[in-house]
């Protein structure tokens, strides 16, 4: 089964077809939610709610579009709702990890980068990770965030500048 | 070099490094960089960040949320449709208005003649989004400095 077939079956009321979509995209969705929320429980909650929202909205989904970029806009709305709600919650970032361990760079540099990423705002972390960890183009980011391409450029530039400042504080030199 | 120029150069250089269409040409960027040491240093340090980021991968999460989603779908299938305030507003406000009007007319027919001009004035104010009778309280005498 592929996405358009699954979506058409969902629109016809087949819940098992929705299971296919959930299982196909849940890992990616949790990764994205986690990068915004930096909390696993919140990320799982947001993804769950987003899938429920998507299920109820699938009747209006245009099957010529791709599922995941559409779903992503629902997911990020759920995530930023949670971000606003927990603004002053003061979460601990000690056991949070966004980056996979890779051997090319020293572990301490990766850790410093991880900490610097976590110190960015949710929106900055989102755009940096979409660009650098997912390798999305500016056009794709613009579609996901529903903003013009020029805004993607300026937001990405500012996010990178902030990241550099955070890294400079941690004295990462290559 | 002004800050606005420098920032647009830095953004254009970032777009080129990302393999994207840049708002400025390479030639234009290089000409600026020859004369602006601040931008050269800025670009060098931003490249270091890019290099560090380019070797990274997202940590793969392995959740299994289908049982939770499925249970929620099951629960919502048997429950009543969600309450919508829109329906209440759509039918409630005209009904309430109609009933209030009938009561006013029954209680005091002469009130109607006062209400109509008042409603009209409110509607005009709302449409203009300004008070047409507003008095200018900031008048100054000729020759007086403000």
Image (cartoon, rainbow, N blue to C red):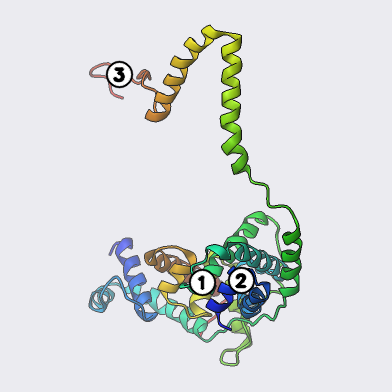
Q: Nearer the viewer, mark 2 or mark 3?
A: 2
Q: Of the residues under marks 1 and 2, which one precedes in the sequence?
A: 2
**Marks 2 and 3 close (CB-CB < 8 Å):** no
Q: Position of residue A115 (x, y in %)?
A: 62, 74
Q: Nearer the viewer, mark 1 or mark 2?
A: 2
Nearer to me, A26 or B51: A26
Nearer to me, B88 or A113: B88
For the residues labelled 1 and 2, the Cα–Cα distance comes to 18 Å
Nearer to me, B48 or B107: B107
Screen quadrant of the N terminus of chain B: bottom left
**Marks 3 and 1 close (CB-CB < 8 Å):** no
Same chain check for tags 2 and 3: no
Within 10 Å of disc 3 (Cα), the crowding (few <14, some 14-19, many 20+) is few
Residue that numbered label 2 is attached to: A10
Q: Is residue A121 above or below residue A20?
A: above
Q: Which mark is residue A69?
A: 1
Q: Secondary structure at mark 2?
A: helix
Q: Is residue B93 above or below residue B63?
A: above
Within 10 Å of disc 2 (Cα), the crowding (few <14, some 14-19, many 20+) is many
Chain ID at mark 3: B
Q: Which mark is residue B140?
A: 3
Residue B135, located in which quarter of the rendered image? top left
Q: Is residue A27 above or below residue B138?
A: below
Q: Secondary structure at mark 3?
A: loop
Q: Nearer the viewer, mark 3 or mark 1?
A: 1
Same chain check for tags 3 and 1: no
């Amino acid at each position: 089964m592929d996405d358009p077939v699954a979506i058409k079956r969902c629109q016809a009321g087949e819940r098992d077809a929705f299971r296919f979509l959930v299982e196909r995209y849940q890992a990616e969705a949790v990764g994205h939610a986690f990068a915004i929320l930096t909390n696993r429980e919140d990320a799982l909650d947001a993804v769950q709610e987003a899938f429920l929202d998507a299920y109820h909205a699938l009747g209006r989904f245009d099957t010529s579009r791709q599922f995941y970029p559409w779903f992503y806009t629902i997911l990020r709305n759920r995530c930023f709702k949670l971000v606003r709600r927990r603004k002053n919650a003061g979460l601990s970032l000690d056991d949070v990890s966004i980056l996979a361990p890779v051997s090319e760079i020293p572990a301490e540099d990766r850790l410093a980068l991880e900490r610097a990423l976590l110190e960015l705002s949710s929106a900055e972390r989102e755009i940096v990770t979409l660009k650098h960890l997912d390798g999305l183009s500016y056009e794709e980011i613009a579609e996901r965030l529903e903003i013009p391409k020029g805004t993607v450029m300026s937001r990405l530039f500012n996010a990178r500048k902030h990241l550099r400042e955070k890294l400079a504080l941690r004295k990462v030199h290559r | 070099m002004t800050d606005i120029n420098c920032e647009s150069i830095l953004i254009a250089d970032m777009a080129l490094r990302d393999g994207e269409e840049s708002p400025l040409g390479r030639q234009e960027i290089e000409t600026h960089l020859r004369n602006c040491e601040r931008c050269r240093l800025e670009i060098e340090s931003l490249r270091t960040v890019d290099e560090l980021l380019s070797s990274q991968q997202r940590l793969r999460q392995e959740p299994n949320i289908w049982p939770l989603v499925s249970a929620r779908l099951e629960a919502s299938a048997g429950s009543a449709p969600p309450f919508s305030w829109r329906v209440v507003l759509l039918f409630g406000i005209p009904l309430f208005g109609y009933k209030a009007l009938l009561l006013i007319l029954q209680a005091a027919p002469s009130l109607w003649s006062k209400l109509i001009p008042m409603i009209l004035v409110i509607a005009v104010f709302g449409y203009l989004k300004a008070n047409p009778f507003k008095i200018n309280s900031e008048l100054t005498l000729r020759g007086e400095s403000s």
